[in-house]
Image: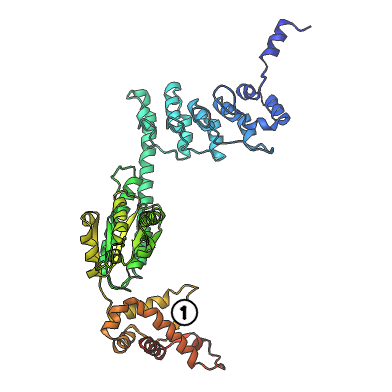
Amino acid sequence: MRSPQDQSSASAKPTTIHSCAQSGDLLAFQTKLQENPSLINAQNAVIMQTPLHVSAGYNNVEIVDFLLNWQGPEKVKLEAKNMYGETPLHMAAKNGCSEAARLLLHHGATVEAKANNGMTPLHLAVWSSLMGDNSLTVKTLLDYNADCSVEDNEGMTPLNYLSQGPESENLRELLSWHLEEQQKHRTIEACSETKAKMAELEQELLNIVGLNELKQQLRKWAKGMLMDEKRRALGLKVAARKVSHMAFLGNPGTGKTMVARLLGKLLHMVGILPTDKVTEVQRTDLVGEFVGQTGPKTRRKIKEAEGGILFVDEAYRLIPLQKTDDKDYGLEALEEIMSMMDSGKVVVIFAGYSEPMKRVISSNEGFCRRVTKFFYFRDFSSEELAQILHLKMKNQAEESPLYGFKLHQSCSVDAITELIERGTTVKQRQEMNGGLVDPMLVNARENLDLRLDFDCSDTDGLLTITLEDLEAGLESLSQ
């Protein structure tokens, strides 16, 4: 028969895996887990804590280590949360358990995890250090670059929890030093990212011939947006920048669609738009044939464009020059677009010939209030068309019919300029603009194929388009 003392010892022995984790009885803990591996992430009935929460909160490092290296069928959940949204690292931090915290961090615990009240482990470690006069856990978290500027749900940073008394001075100096170093690092990182993104934009702009006024506006927008991004990276609060809705005015082939796609990429790159998607639509995509069809049809396209740009090409077709009957619903489509332009969900670009676009502008009194940026795409000169041709030959995609081909050294910009000037009329250039280049090159390649002999073994000659080929290509186009 057991003595009362023996019975007392027996009753005090841990009975659950959570009590083993609390007491630090590694042998009993191992036995229970090996008998029932599914207990590894079991949550207790009180505050939904796992064995890792409990062992970390009591700094029972051997059990924490055993759990982190457990090789059973189910792995321990590092980021499991109790009813307060606290992870095991939160538990180690708020109880000043620096050894357990370091072990958890070494195995990849998230140093910036937030509890339901928005507190990170660093918030709790600072609070704990004030209670126990021990800043080891704070130092451990800072070794893993815990953010000193992060705010909880009350807008409080870890520094805000320090009192003004002398007992907090050392901890204040420690946090302040790390905060300053983190801000320096963010500044360097933000500057580097900003410069890289501006360099990427400039590289894109090199592929646009002419349009200097528009390119300067794109630079201004990009610089402003990227500077705001840098400000926010440094913890500064600035108002969200909104991009204006736009009108691109000019003849076909002047680069309106290309610039819209570049703009989508730019706005996404700097975080203004969630996607770089440019949804290109024309009248037929928006306007129905019968009453009641236009509204839903237009709204579907607007929904499709959300998060990006809605590019309305040949927008003047929404407002016919003169009504042939009373069943034209273009104005209804325009009004649907206008009604959602203040939502901020999509950027709208209207594109078309300058003169006909005046009908669109005057058809809706809210147009100029919503569309505040107008860009004029002038016709390309012969020299600019020659530059576009050179750029296209340098940047051929694999799916292009001209991929792998090159220009002969005689095909300088000056030589091609003279060829275009001589081989086309002003009217033809105005009507086609950049649209003249692709068919001219395709025709030139066909002429190359025609003049080559099947016995030709000159690999360079097989891929080289000459000035003669370009001239023949231009003649075919004119015919």
- Counting from the top left corner in percent of width and height, residue 37 is at 69, 32
- Counting from the top left corner in percent of width and height, residue 332 is at 30, 57
Whether 457 is drawn above or below 34: the answer is below
Which residue is identified by label 1?
A: 402
Q: In which quarter of the image is the C terminus?
A: bottom left
- Counting from the top left corner in percent of width and height, residue 383 is at 29, 81
Mark 1 is on which residue type? Leu
What's the residue at 72%, 27% (across, down)? 31
Q: Is residue 273 left or right of residue 83?
A: left
- Residue lying at the far front in this picture: please name it: 325
The reply to whether residue 269 is visible in this rendering is no
- Taking depth in this image into account, of 293 and 256 the one nearest to the observer is 293
The image's colour scheme reads rainbow
Whether 202 is drawn above or below 370: the answer is below
- Counting from the top left corner in percent of width and height, residue 348 is at 32, 57
**Among the 4 quarters of the image, the one containing residue 247:** bottom left
The crowding category of the residue bearing disc 1, from other C-alpha atoms within 10 Å (few below 14, some 14 to 19, many at least 20), is: many
Q: Quadrant of the N terminus?
A: top right
Whether 357 is drawn above or below 445: the answer is above
Q: In this view, does 381 lie to the left or right of 91?
A: left
- Taking depth in this image into account, of 209 and 79 the one nearest to the observer is 209
What's the residue at 42%, 26% (across, down)? 127
Total numbered labels: 1
What's the residue at 26%, 69% (across, down)? 212
Q: In this view, does 47 lie to the left or right of 187?
A: right
The reply to whether residue 291 is visible in this rendering is yes
**Among the 4 quarters of the image, the one containing residue 245:** bottom left
Badge 1 marks a residue whose secondary structure is loop
